[in-house]
Image: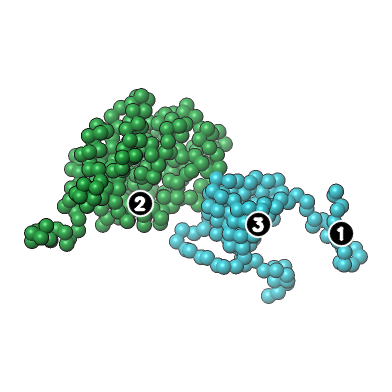
Amino acid sequence: MGEIIVVTSGKGGVGKTTSTANIGTGLATLGHKVALIDTDIGLRNLDVVLGLENRIVFDIVDVVNGSCRLRQALIRDKRLEGLHLLPAAQTKDKTAVNPDQMRELCAELKKEFDYVIIDCPAGIEQGFRNAIAGAEKAVVVTTPEVSAVRDADRIIGLLEAADLREPKLIINRIRPKMVRQGEMMSIEDIIDILAVDLLGIIPEDEMIVITTNRGEAVVLDQNSRSGQAYRNIVRRILGEDVPIINLDEEDGFFKKLKRIIGIK
Amino acid sequence: MANSYIISGFGQGSQADLEDLLDENTILVQRTLRSGQSIHYNGNVVVLGDINPGAEIAATGNIIVMGALRGVVHAGAGGDENAVVMAFHLQPTQLRIANHITRPPDNEAVDPNHPEMARIKDGVVTIESFQTGGERQGKVT
């Protein structure tokens, strides 16, 4: 029996889809059977980020309508044996699926997969209600911006109302330099407002853009900081105790050297 | 309105053959199809515009795109293996003819800048340069 996790945020563009793809890929590289569900019907992206768009024949709407079997709609990842995607429909809208159908679908997938990760659409309307319907745990993604944190707070309230207690937080796109200069909200500031457990922090990283555009996952890139951050998140999901990376110490060789010889 | 066309200059006897070729069941789509937009039609579809990624056309007949085809198309959706897909810039996410489903290979980025046509040849979906006249008919070579 697997675990069903929804990745949500309220605000758009904070990294739900990127996080879903990377956490799923990360879990699959460690040998777990993972199913990713894209619930953003009408604005699907997860298939593109994973580079699986051209393999889609059936989608989630076909499954809930009974036009095809669940097995037919699941797309196996091109690299990882254990990673599967249930894509959203692009030519329908959120009303094509209802929360009861989602619950049924999740229960079905749970039997076969170790982890079922649901990529939630932005907003708090039907798409959100569908996405959280079958979930057992929640991960909230935010960025160090007042608007994103405000929306995350609203989402955490809605999750609690739906009995999804103790969601975990990912803070994405942190720029250590700006935080140091007091121009960006710090991790402490955000935790202070949201009062939830931190699952991980992801530094702003060009590699995210590069890998996403290529349809690859940054978590597979051993050299990038964001890849390392996602690998840590994956280990924490698996129950390991991994310390949060200290962004100050990872500012590159020259910064470190300067600090050592005492320039700053 | 069934006979509101004139065919002439083909000589005696060919009139009937040519009428067989006529098909009034064709729609002309004078716009670009964007992501999320789709057309399902019982007949042929001609598009004066592009088919963007995420857009979809399914037709029981042929599909002709006078522009870039980057989305998903399904020609011969009723099972017609003679259906063809033609585009000025054929770069589909996925291309289906009858019950055949194909997608471009993962690591080869081919981007020819001329019209191409896809059809089923010996049971396999084949893409070739679109050539007019005798060459297309197989009379040359």
Residue at image coords 56%, 42%: A91
According to the picture, the residue beneath numbered tag 3 turns out to be B48
Please, what secondary structure does the residue beneath circle 2 have? loop
Q: Residue at x 49, y 29 (%)?
A: A98
User: In this rendering, is residue B88 above or below A26?
Assistant: below
Question: Picture coordinates of residue A109 (x, y %)?
Answer: 42, 34
Alpha carbons under labels 3 and 2: distance apart:
37 Å
Which residue has dot 2 on it? A217
Residue sitting at the far right: B12
- Is residue A214 placed above or below A134 in the rendered structure? below
Q: Position of residue A176 (x, y in %)?
A: 22, 50
For the view shown, which residue lies furthest in the left direction?
A261
Say which colour chain B has: cyan
Numbered mark located on residue B6 in the image: 1
Is A193 situated left or right of B100 in this image?
left
- A70 left or right, relative to B39: left
Specify few, some or many for label 3: CA neighbours under 10 Å numbering under 14, 14-19, or 20 or more: some
Chain letter matching colour green: A
Three-letter code for the amino acid on which mark 1 is drawn: Ile
Amino acid type shown at disc 3: Leu
Instruction: Report the mark closest to the observer, 1 or 3.
Output: 3
The image shows residue A8 at horizontal and vertical percentages of 37, 37
Residue ID at (85%, 48%): B1
Q: What whole-number distance in Å separates the C-alpha atoms at marks 1 and 3?
A: 25 Å
Q: Which quarter of the rendered picture does the C terminus of chain B lie within?
A: bottom right
